[in-house]
Structures are given as C-alpha cells and as structure tokens.
C-alpha cells in the first residue's frame, strides 16, 4: 500500500511539473521583435511602411497591424491574450507559436516559427539573410507574412531583408473584373422597343461583378439598369432587378429599388424579384451598419487616426478585424443607416398595403425578421 501511495505521489509531482513546464514553455520565446512584411514590400511600400513589430510576453502577443487610408498608413497594435496562443499539432509546426483565428478556434490565423526550431524552413525561404522568427499563414499554403529579428537589431540587417522582398509598385488595373461593353451602343439597345433577349443578355454582361468597378463605371452601368427597370417586358425588369441580388450590390441601387417598390406591379414574379433585391441590399446594409455601430460604441468615431490616438493604438482582435473589414470597403459598398431604414420601410409598406402572393410574402417576412431595425 505504501509503495502504491509513493508511486501515485510521484505521478502527481510529475503532473504538476508538466503543467509548470507547459505554462512556461514559451518563456524562451519572449522578447521584442522587429521585422519586414514581404507582402507590403513587394507592393512597393517604403522601408518604413513595410516594418512590423511584435512583443511576446506573459500577457500574450502584441502585434503591429497597419491599415491604409487615403494613401496613409495608420499602425495599430493587436493584443492577443495568452488564451489565443497555442501549439498547432501536425503540419510539422508543433514547436511554433500559433495564434487562434478566434477566441474558441482550434485553427491558426498565423504561426511564428523561431529559427532555433526551424532551421531548414528558414534557410529555404530566407537563405540570403538570417531571421530570428518567420511568421507564416496559419492555413493553406505557408505564405510568409513577416520576417523578424530580435531586438536590438541593426537597421542594416533589417534593410537587407526589405531589399530582398521589395518590388517597384505596379499600376493597379481598373475594372479588371468587369466585362467590356460599349456604353453608347448599350444604351441604344436598351432604349429600343422589343428585342428583350438582347437586353437581358446585355444587362447580365454589364452588371457582372459591378461592385468592383470604378465610381464612373458603376454609374454608367446603373443607367442601363434603370432603363431595364422601365422596360415594358417583365423579363427585362426581372433581369435588371437581379443586379442587386447578385454581383451589383452597390449602395446606389437602394434608391432605384425603393422607388421601384413604390410603383404598382401586377406581375407576381417581378414583385417577388423586387423584394428579393431589396432584401439582398438590406442584408448588406444591415451587416455593414451593425459593424459600424460596434466601432462607434467603442470609440465614438470612425476616423482611424482618432481611434489610434484614443486607444494608443491598442485594439482587441475583434476590434481590429471589424475595422479592417470596414476600411477595405469601397465607397460604393458602404451603407448609411438611412439607406438601411429606407429599404426596410419600403418592404414593410408594400407588405402592409396589399395582399401579396405567397412567394413575395415569404421574402418580405424573411427580410423583416432576419434584419430588424436596431435602436
């Protein structure tokens, strides 16, 4: 009995020691690191704009996270608490320091590979210059997100890493996701009486990936959609409306759809299509404004520089993720609260004003239930 108790005691001590070792297993990785983002450098960003830093200590990991607004870089710092730090099993990165995709996730958004543990990996990617830590994407192809040196480090060493990744900025192609059309000829087609099939094909071509176009191009192509909404053929009207339920979910469509719903429509399918378009635009507006409200609740402003000054640049992972999503949006897919309310009110009014066909009624109810107004 004594031997059994002694044995169990040793197991318990070993268990406690293992817990202590696991808890402190990252202590040797702690420190301040300064590095270069190959992605930013390869886009032609300057040496200063391409720099990233992170601090790893007992509170977790604090990582630089730049956002670009109107050609200027505003640098924030994301604090990932210790609960976000884990070891990702498999993929030969067990010794790396992984950061969760979200608080409860078992997947990594990125992984820090320390050179002391991953010599072969580092040499394969950065053979021209030593690196203390390489940050890679947490899933899919192991793309390099950052190359870091432990502080203090020399400016010269950091510049050598930058020079290895740098590429001159390339001009951004405009409207590269849009199909080419002759606008003047397209208008003539849309204004002709009859030939509905040609109009439908034209609308489908002109509005594909519409949201990716420039402001001027979006405006031109929405003029074709407006002609389609005024067409006497219900099939042409339905194709014009599909713009806003498929790839043309732009804020300029709100007024067009709201005005269309105010008009009397005898064709049940046209009415259902109009409600579907209004619902899709409402979804986009509701999602966007929900995130805007979260940022305003936290910071009372949407201005990146004011948020940085107010928080000293320190954000939670969720705050940064929301800010990043909002910041990446083009003006044409940013929505005001008034636009959201206009869509909701238009759906509500048409449902209250008449007995709707079953399909249209289902669409309207779904919109009002899933995307309610928020006070």
Image (cartoon, rainbow, N blue to C red):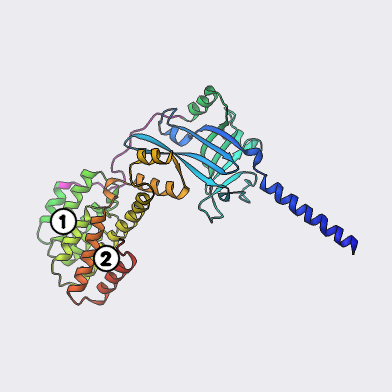
Is residue 5 found left or right of 325 in the rendered image? right
Graded by Cα atoms within 10 Å as few (under 14), some (14 to 19) or many (20 or more), the crowding at tag 2 reads: many
- Label 1 and label 2: CA atoms lie apart by 17 Å
Front residue (pair 347, 275): 347
Residue 175, magenta (yes or no): yes
Asked which secondary structure carries label 2, the reply is: helix
The residue to which callout 2 is attached is: 276
- Which quadrant does the N terminus fall into? bottom right
| Residue at horizontal 37 percent and vertical 53 percent from the top | 294
The residue to which callout 1 is attached is: 226
Which residues, given as a range, are shown in magenta?
166-183
Picture layout, residue 53 above or below residue 345: above
Q: Residue furthest right?
A: 2
Number of on-image labels: 2
Q: Main secondary structure of the magenta part?
A: loop
Q: Are marks 1 and 2 in contact (CB under 8 Å)?
A: no
């Amino acid at each position: 009995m004594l031997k059994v108790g002694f044995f169990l005691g040793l197991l318990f001590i070993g268990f406690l020691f293992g817990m202590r070792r696991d808890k402190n297993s990252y202590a040797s990785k702690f420190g301040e690191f300064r590095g270069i983002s190959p992605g930013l450098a390869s886009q032609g960003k300057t040496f200063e704009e391409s720099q990233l830093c992170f601090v790893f200590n007992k509170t977790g990991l604090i990582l630089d996270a730049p956002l670009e607004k109107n050609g200027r870089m505003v640098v924030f710092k994301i604090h990932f608490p210790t609960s976000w730090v884990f070891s990702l099993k498999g993929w030969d990165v067990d010794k790396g320091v992984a950061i969760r995709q979200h608080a409860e996730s078992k997947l990594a958004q990125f992984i820090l590979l320390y050179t002391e543990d991953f010599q072969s990996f580092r040499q394969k990617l950065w053979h021209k210059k030593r690196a203390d830590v390489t940050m890679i994407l947490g899933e899919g192809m192991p793309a390099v997100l950052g190359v870091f040196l432990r502080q203090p480090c020399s400016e010269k060493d950091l510049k050598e890493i930058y020079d290895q990744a740098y590429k001159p900025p390339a001009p951004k192609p405009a409207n590269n996701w849009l199909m080419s059309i002759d606008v003047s000829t397209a208008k003539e087609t849309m204004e002709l009486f009859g030939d509905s099939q040609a109009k439908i094909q034209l609308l489908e071509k002109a509005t594909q990936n519409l949201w990716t176009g420039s402001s001027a191009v979006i405006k031109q192509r929405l003029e074709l959609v407006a002609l389609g909404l005024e067409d006497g053929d219900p099939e042409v009207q339905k194709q014009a409306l599909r713009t806003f339920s498929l790839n043309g979910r732009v804020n300029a469509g709100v007024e067009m759809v709201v005005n269309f719903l105010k008009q009397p429509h005898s064709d049940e399918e046209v009415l259902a299509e109009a409600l579907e378009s209004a619902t899709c635009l409402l979804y986009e507006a509701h999602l966007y404004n929900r995130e805007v409200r979260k940022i305003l609740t936290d910071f009372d402003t949407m201005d990146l520089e004011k948020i940085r000054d107010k928080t000293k640049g320190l954000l939670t992972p969720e705050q940064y993720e929301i800010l990043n999503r909002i910041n990446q949006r083009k003006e044409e897919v940013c929505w005001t609260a008034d636009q959201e309310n206009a869509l909701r009110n238009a759906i509500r009014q048409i449902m209250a004003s008449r007995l709707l066909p079953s399909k249209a009624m289902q669409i309207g109810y779904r919109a009002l239930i899933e995307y309610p107004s928020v006070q």
